Image (cartoon, rainbow, N blue to C red):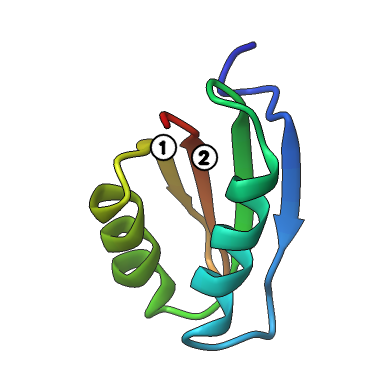
């Protein structure tokens, strides 16, 4: 499984703090260790909020990709 082919993808565009982090947490809990979750968000605060949550919970932030309007996170479940 590579970072380019996530196990699961969620779209949290239109949602604002703390909802993107909450949805990320819920989806990560459903995955198995080693699975990859892709999140698409448009709240600028999500970059810091999701990155901090990933680090605090011991998962791996594989990538953050920015476009004009969106942020795309790729997270690997580590525990």
| Residue at mark 1 | 63
Image location of residue 30, percent across then percent down: 70, 45
Q: Is residue 12 left or right of 45 when viewed as pictured?
A: right
C-alpha separation, residue under disc 2 versus residue under disc 1? 5 Å
Q: Give the vertical position of 18 relative to 77 (above or below).
A: below
Q: Residue at x 42, y 32 (%)?
A: 79
Do the CB atoms of the residues marked 2 and 1 lie less than 8 Å apart? yes
Q: Is residue 53 left or right of 24 when viewed as pictured?
A: left
Q: Give the vertical position of 16 relative to 67 (above or below).
A: below
Image location of residue 46, percent across then percent down: 42, 72
Q: Is residue 42 left or right of 27 when viewed as pictured?
A: left
Q: Which mark is residue 74?
A: 2
Q: Residue at x 49, y 33 (%)?
A: 77
Image location of residue 72, percent across then percent down: 55, 52
Element under disc 2: strand
Quadrant of the image containing the N terminus: top right
């Amino acid at each position: 499984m590579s970072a380019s082919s996530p196990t699961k993808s969620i779209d949290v565009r239109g949602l604002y703090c703390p909802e993107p982090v909450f949805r990320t947490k819920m989806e990560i809990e459903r995955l198995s260790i080693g699975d990859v979750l892709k999140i698409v968000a448009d709240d600028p605060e999500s970059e810091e909020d999701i990155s901090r949550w990933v680090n605090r919970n011991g998962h791996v932030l594989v990538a953050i990709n920015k476009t004009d309007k969106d942020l795309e996170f790729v997270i690997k479940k580590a525990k």
